[in-house]
Amino acid sequence: MAGFRGRSVYRRRPDREGGLPPGRLGQHPTISRRGSRPPLSTLASHKWPAVSRALFDTRDESEILRLAMNHVSAVGPYRAEGGYLRVHGHMVPSPQVGPGQASAVDRTVRELTGRDVPVTVPGRSRGRALALQGPGGLHGYLVVTSRSRPTEAQHFLLATLVRLTAAALSVAVAHRRQREDALELHRLRRERAAFQRRLVSLVVELGYQRAVHEALAEVAVSGGGEEAITSALHGLTGFPVLVEDRFGRLRSWTGPGRPDPYPEPDPARHEQMLQGVARRGGLVRINDRLISLVRPRGEVLGVLAVVDPKDDADEYTVFALEHAATSLAVELSHLRHLAEVELRLRRELVDDLLGGTDEASAYARSEAFGHDLHRIQYVVVVQWRNRAADDAFARTVGRAASAVGMPSLVTRRSDHVVLVAEGSPHDHALYETLARETGTPDGTIGVSARCDTPDGIPGRYQEALRALEVRRRSRRRYGTTFFDDLGLYRILGPGNEYQELEAFVREWLGPLVDYDGRHRTALVETLSRYFDCGGNYAETAESLAIHRSTLRYRLQRIREISGHDLTSVEDRLNLQVATRVWKIMLGGPG
């Protein structure tokens, strides 16, 4: 060969086992300068280019190792016993390694660090592990055995196959790493793009959150109340916003589409809706509304909702609605606290009025609450079945009284609520309103006679209780009873006093008693005798020693002066009782 001087002499040192020459395969054995390269095998001359192309055209490392192992026997008396690839720093055997040989060879190969060393393969001779060391480092090992001592040419071909295999593995590894790097770069670019999008989203989200906080904080500082909160939420979301009270009545609406009139809530259905929303927690969609309960400290004070018929609400709307509900809870809680303080002060005033208090103080204190005690007052007591007379029920009664045009001061007792109301109640309007509010008609209301001055309120309270008791003991125990309509029942109860009896007689016989006093007549006595005789004209005239025509004249005058109809069963009963009381308990004439 060119470059060598002298004779062509192959120098080799036999290994101790008489197998392959020692030293690292992949390096040519020593060749004398004067000699020439030994003749190559058929593989070298005819098939070597094809083998080389097959190795370098393959990008799969396992396939390169398989091809190399398949061609080991073509370069000499060799047998490929196994192949190993370096994977993550560890030698992994190829599937061609026989199970019987694996354990013996694996232990040796796994401990190698890039050197060619002899190995013992059970049942084989001249075994050697050849390092597949390429430009990219150690890629694995080929374990080969030889059935006879190979020639220098065969040894050279094997070394060449090892070098080609190592080079092909280096190329495959480089390509793999390039693909992995490209994939990693693509992944990093995707992550960067996702991070940038998230960063932009966070900036927008933080900006929106800051806008929500600033808007609601401005409302809180300005003290605008619930109207300002709904207006701010409408501006932030673009949806119509509403607030309902605990009973489903509209308190505030901001935005288009407000129903007119607003539908009257069904108490039972509304309560069921509130319980369902409370169980689910958080925001709940019901029909076209996204609803949040306003309930500081667990007590439901109302409902805040956005009207969203097309289900367009996004996370920004949810965020704004949640924070607006928190602000509204603070506002309604504050209003509730003020209402409770006012209710307590009102209750103290009513308690003093019912027990008797200084008129000047009563006038001044009631004026502070906007209640005019100078007007005619009525005392109203309210008792409802299965409803405790607590603050909540007292507030309900107060709202109902205001709704029917009865400005009132409210307090409560152990089993009933008491109103001191301006002006006469309108028939059964209060009862009907409370029946709708509570969802049940099982309630009783007693109304006193009129009261002209504060010092008469304690007595009127007893009258209202009497009316309530009479109603409760009647066949139709639920409804409203006025003390003025009790008639005889005013004096049929415990705790009656002389003054009350005299008032009853005065109501029914007063004009007749006054007429007798002015004209020295005996119309009241005539009426009493008439009732004592069972309405018999002859017996009455005889007992009075007057003519029947005179009796008829007197009875006609009694009708005219008293204004009572003697043919009415109710009037006859009340007049008869009044004449008995007049005669027996009040001493008769005079």
Image (cartoon, rainbow, N blue to C red):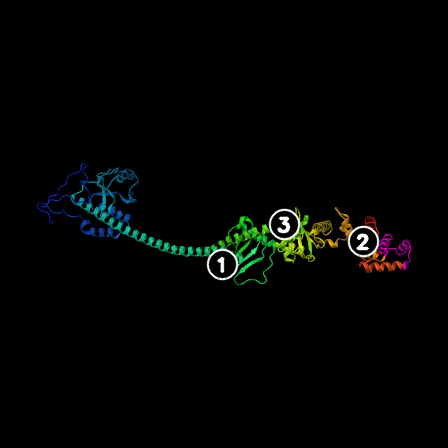
Q: CA distance from mark 2 to mark 3?
A: 40 Å
Choose between 356 and 161: the one closer to the eye: 356
User: Who is closer to the viewer here, 464 or 584?
Assistant: 584
Q: Amino acid at mark 2?
A: Leu
> Which residue is identified by label 1?
232
Q: Nearer the viewer, mark 2 or mark 3?
A: 3
Q: How many residues crowd mark 3 within 10 Å: few (<14), some (14–19), many (20+)?
A: some
Residue 310 in the image: x percent, y percent?
50, 60
Residue at the limit of the structure toward the left, as seen here: 6
Instruction: Tell me if I can see residue 491 in this picture.
Output: no
Residue 538 or residue 154, whichever sits in front = 538
Dot placed on the residue nearer the N-terminal end, 2 or 1: 1
426 above or below 87? below
Q: Helix or strand or loop: what does disc 3 sit on?
A: helix
Q: Amino acid at mark 1?
A: Ala
Q: Magenta residues, as a range?
A: 520-549
Magenta stretch: dominant secondary structure: helix
- Left or right: 514 as drawn, with respect to 162: right
Q: Where does the image place residue 368, in percent across and percent down from the top left?
A: 61, 54
- Asked if the stretch drawn in magenta spans residue 219, the answer is no
Tell which of 7 and 345 is nearer to you.
345
Question: Circle 2 is placed at which residue position?
Answer: 573
User: Element type at marker 1?
Assistant: helix
Q: Which mark is residue 215?
A: none
Residue 473, x across and y down, in percent: 73, 49
Q: Is residue 266 visible?
A: yes
For label 3, the residue is 347
Characterize the local packing of mark 2: few (<14), some (14-19) or many (20 or more) Cα atoms within 10 angstroms.
some
Can you give x and y, in whole percent of width and height, for residue 269 in the image?
59, 54
Q: Residue at x 47, y 59 (%)?
A: 236
Give the Cα separation between the discs numbered 2 and 1. Answer: 67 Å
Is residue 96 rendered to the left or right of residue 214? left
